[in-house]
Image (cartoon, rainbow, N blue to C red):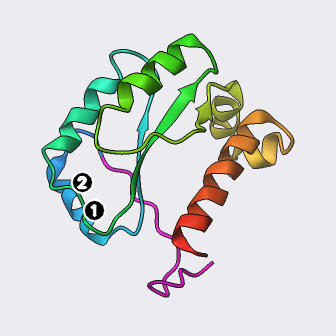
Amino acid sequence: MKSKRRNTDLVIIDTSAQSSETMEIAFQMADLAYFPCRPKLFSTDKIPYTRALPKPQKTPVFILPNFCRQGELAHITRTQLQRYDYPVLDFGISDNSAFKTSISDGRCVLEDDPAGQATRDIKNLFCFTKIKLRF
């Protein structure tokens, strides 16, 4: 799949939340960025590291709730995350054992459970990414 904007293949870069130098370089190269964040009180503490970076001018950045259950804690965390400079996605990646099971066998959830919640989550993220990058 080619990006219409840069005529390149899709490249995904996963950086450490504590490596501001690596994140800054990735921001300069990126057309789109996600900050995965587990909806647990002490997992949101990595988001402030991103505030030290200059906010990318042309790169849309979203906070992606990661390994979350739809419930009160996820709602509280989503509300807490909204105080940062980046929008929080309305969807996330579920807390689903399918990810752990499939990766241990070298597969992905789309192969292991094509009709499952984990597959729907990944497809939602991919569809959102395609729309934002105009694939």
Q: Which residue is mark 2?
A: 23
- Cα distance, mark 2 to mark 1? 6 Å
- Amino acid type for the residue under numbered disc 2: Met
- Amino acid type for the residue under numbered disc 1: Phe
Query: Who is closer to the viewer here, 69 or 98?
Result: 69
Residue placed at 37% from the left, 23% from the top? 80
- The span picked out in magenta is 1-15
Q: Secondary structure at mark 1?
A: helix
Please state if 80 lies on the left or on the right of 94 as rendered.
left
Residue 55 position, x and y percent, is: 21, 55
> In the image, is residue 98 above or below residue 134?
above
Residue 32 position, x and y percent, is: 42, 62
Query: Who is closer to the viewer here, 94 or 109?
Result: 94
Residue 49 position, x and y percent, is: 19, 38
> In the image, is residue 13 above or below residue 29?
above
Q: Which residue is mark 1?
A: 27
- For this orientation, the residue located farthest to the top is 72
Residue placed at 44% from the left, 85% from the top? 6
Q: Secondary structure at mark 2?
A: helix
Does the magenta run of residues contain 7?
yes
Q: Label 2 crowding class (10 Å Cα cut-off): few <14, some 14-19, many 20+?
A: many
Task: Tell whether label 1 touches label 2 (CB within 8 Å).
Answer: yes
Total marks drawn?
2
> In the image, is residue 88 above or below residue 60?
above
Residue 70 position, x and y percent, is: 64, 21
- For this orientation, the residue located farthest to the bottom is 7
Please state if 21 lies on the left or on the right of 34 as rendered.
left
Does the magenta run of residues contain 50?
no
Residue placed at 35% from the left, 45% from the top? 86
